[in-house]
Image: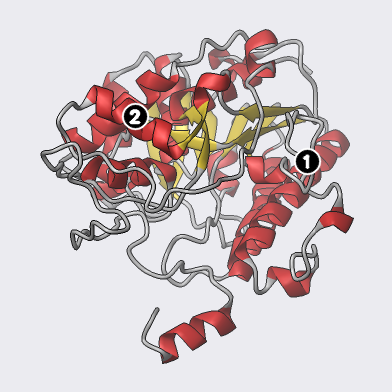
Amino acid sequence: MAAISSGDGPVAVTGAAGYIGSHIVSTLVKNGYEVRACVRDANKLTNVAHLSLMNSSGPGSVTLHSCDMTIPGAYDDVFKGCAGIFHAAAEMGNLEGSTPQKVYDGGLLATQMVMDSIKKAGTVKRLVYTSSFAAVGHPAPEGPLTEDSWADMNQDKRAPGKEWTMEVVAKDREVAYAMTKVDSERYVYKEAEENGFEAFGVCPCHVIGPLLSKSHMRPWVWQTRIGDMLAGYGHPRMFWNIVDVRDVAEAQRLIAECPDNHNGERYNLVATDESGMIPQQEVQAHLQRMYPGVGIAGNWREGEFRKGPISVLQKVITQLGLKPHTVEQTIKDNADSLLAWGLVETREGVDNWQREGNELGLKSKWRPHTYPALDPEIKKQLEAKGEA
């Protein structure tokens, strides 16, 4: 199957107003594509105006299309005549009203409807699906994870209550998200094989980098957690595996244009090398060097942390020729964009940040409330106690 190019016809991007989706649209427009951007509401300018502005970055173009991914046939008209589809829309679980079941359905069922529209169009040559590193990581000793790793490996090592069953899916967002990504990936590869086109999976880990819209600062996403650190709000210990959002987007264009890949290939979008696999206190150190004299937050409480996930960017470099950003540039551009949008206020004084023993009354924008896609029973209990 031939790779696509900007001369093969229009392409469509689902979830185009989102963080990754917006960057996909941007790189496609800059490389001459006619892009049909699928969004929840094309009239909600606060969420989509940045996409319309991309028409000035040319030589490609972008048009906006309202598409509700929960409605069958929503993409039928938009996909007509398209040579490529970039499916970045998903139910993450971080918006109000979400549940673990909605996370699963918003992955697999929504992807099935995307596939139905692709088959009706009859012109699509390639589908690039934004999966997740959650579809890669599995219970195993610490070590490098490659594209051959799948999250449903080593099921016997899963903790009680973390089994991959639909009963657990209804209660556990983590299991629901990993399962829906694995199931959706395998589904699109199978359908593509049977219907004469090719599908590819992209599995990003901790995605950060510049925000293209104020709307990209949302709860429970990594670019917002960087904002909390910049504002002086300390978080629990964490090991980061950082990839630039621009690299995630550019990789997808290169996948669609590559003449040497084939249906079912996966691409881990992870740290370029060990410089991007770092504990939270090293992310803090980077920010402190970039913004001297500012109260940059680190760990809420010091202690042990698990060193993982371990995975290094390889395939997108060796096969596709991607030239990734440095981790320093990624962190800096993430932070600078938050400041430019006026989304973060910094605090003077290098020790002036909130942590155990230094409570400053700061509120988290990353974790402003109980996670929406929580076990419904647990959420009821928390609400009854006034803790949700």
Residue at 64 percent of width and 17 percent of height = 316
**First along the sequence among labels 1 and 2:** 1
In the rendered view, tell whether residue 315 sits above or below residue 169.
Answer: above
Task: Examine the rendering and report whether any part of residue 246 can be seen.
Answer: yes
Q: Which residue is mark 1?
A: 141
Residue at 66 percent of width and 46 percent of height = 134
Q: Residue placed farthest to the left in the image?
A: 348
Horizontally, is 296 left or right of 243 in the view? left
The image quarter in which residue 220 lies: bottom left
**Circle 2: residue type:** Ala
Task: Examine the rendering and report whether any part of residue 131 can be seen.
Answer: no
Q: Foreground: 285 or 104?
A: 285
Horizontally, is 114 left or right of 149 in the view? left
**Circle 1: residue type:** Pro
Residue at 61 percent of width and 8 percent of height = 321
In the rendered view, tell whether residue 228 sits above or below residue 161.
Answer: above
Residue 211, horizontal then vertical, whole percent: 32, 35
